[in-house]
Amino acid sequence: MGKHTLPEDFFFGAAMSGPQTEGAWRSGGKIENLWDTWSNEDLGDFYNRVGSYAGNDFMARYREDLALMASLGLTTYRTSIQWSRLLTAEGEINPEGAAWYHELFRASREAGLECFVNLYHFDMPTFLFRRGGWERREVVEAYAHYAELAFREFGQEVRYWFTFNEPTVEPEQRYQEGVWYPKLHDFGRARTVQYHISLAHALGVAAFRRAQAAGEVRADAKIGLINAFTPTYTREDPTPADLEAVRMIGGINNRWWLDLITAGHLPEDVVDTLGARGVNLPVRPDDDAILAEGVVDWLGCNYYHPTRVQAPASDRDEYGLPRFADEYIWPEARMNESRGWEIYPQGLYDFGIDVRDNYPGLEWFVSESGMGVMDEYKHRGEDGRIEDPYRVDFVRDHLVSVSEAIAAGSPCRGYHYWGLIDNWSWSNAFKNRYGFVEVDLMDGYRRRLKRSADWLAEVTRTHVLD
Ligand code: BG6
């Protein structure tokens, strides 16, 4: 019949993060993180000068938001604990911060929602950044300590833990592409950061296993990693040099993490090529044993767009650093013009098949997928609701791809929509709106369902897509 459905036990949920929703940036004992610091130093870098301060007002409205999620038929959601809220600068639990998360987890249970908890979402405490951030081992150790305290504090309440969200992004945005504070262009430093985050992840998993063995974490709890996967493609008739570009870009962004979480090591071919090009990782003698602990119970895949590459015109970039690929512009690409990202639902199917074939036994779920649209208020209908059929098409097409991957034998367990309730998108602030639920900034952060929410509620009820 050509009907696409999702399994009965397939879960639907929402994805969000502490720094993008909570607000209350300097109350309750919260210390500064890099987003607060960047906002304070250069508010003009943020769209419409909206900095990190208020999130989407979640700390004031969490009960309403949880009820909204449940009313749309969601059973799970993910947020993150903010390191800068849970711990003091002395590395001790901040009681007010801990009380907030206890309350959030309690309210989630009461609303019938399972809360997935991530420990790090690009939100480095500023004092640690000043000591070198992810370029320093000391900060890797500090993360391990933070993770240990979080497992101990919430171990009886939380079932689904994640060490990091998108560990590919900070190296790239902060250290390589010069987009986020401190806006560096240094491929080598970016790889050092990536390597140290890998160690921090592995130490986090090790701390989880220890806490579980000691009974501090529930016996039925699982630990995972959430990463942004960008299936990497090249032109139809590739040269060997194009394929080499795919190997390195796919290797740095995707295989690096997939190998770490399934086999407990980094892809040798990638590390070797980096070394041959003068990019040496700050490896210490015991690191192999640390990385070996990085194997997880399952994986979250954030998928927004593919990466299309070709052989680079020059093997050095404008800063004199190694360059492994140029962008390949696929003539047939369909774009989300607001965000500048290609819309390619098949990437999710291809990811599922990659997992099935190359990482057998690895369970996964779509931990983020979403469409951000600029000036969405212009789509407001007569009854005040935003008319967003493009969002329905986007999500349906991606879910169809997931259902086809499952039918082909890929163990995908669920789908979390990113930004179910409009939230603060880093330096883009509230420019591109992702939500099925509008946050009206002109009306005190008031929540209002967009039209697409009706469709979502129907799909979560029936699991039928077309
Ligand atoms: C992911 C992040 O990269 O994509 C989120 O985990 C982010 O934090 C989301 O908000 C959407 O990207 P953006 O830049 O449009 O907010």
Image: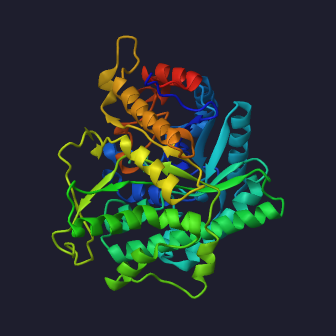
Residue at the extreme right of the image, as rendered: 215
- x 26%, y 72%: residue: 323
Q: In terms of depth relative to the viewer, which is nearer, 261 or 34?
A: 261
Q: Quadrant of the C terminus?
A: top left
The spot of residue 386 in percent (x, y) is 38, 21
Answer with the quarter of the image where residue 185 lies: bottom left
Q: Using the image, determine if residue 317 lies above or below residue 373.
A: below
Q: Quadrant of residue 369?
A: top left
Identity of the residue drawn at 58% across and 29% down: 69
Near-viewer residue (22 or 251): 251
Q: Residue at x 57, y 64 (%)?
A: 261
Q: Is residue 122 visible?
A: no
Of residues 423 and 397, the one nearer the viewer is: 397
Horizontal placement of 274 versus 163: left or right? left
- Rendering coords of residue 128 (x, y %): 54, 70
Q: How far from the left and from the top, in percent, is residue 125?
A: 54, 63
Q: Quadrant of the N terminus?
A: top left
Q: Position of residue 198 (x, y in %)?
A: 53, 69
- View extreme (bottom): residue: 285
Q: Is residue 206 above or below residue 46?
A: below
Depicted 57 relative to depicted 153: above or below: above
Q: Look at the picture and state if 147 lies above or below 66.
A: below
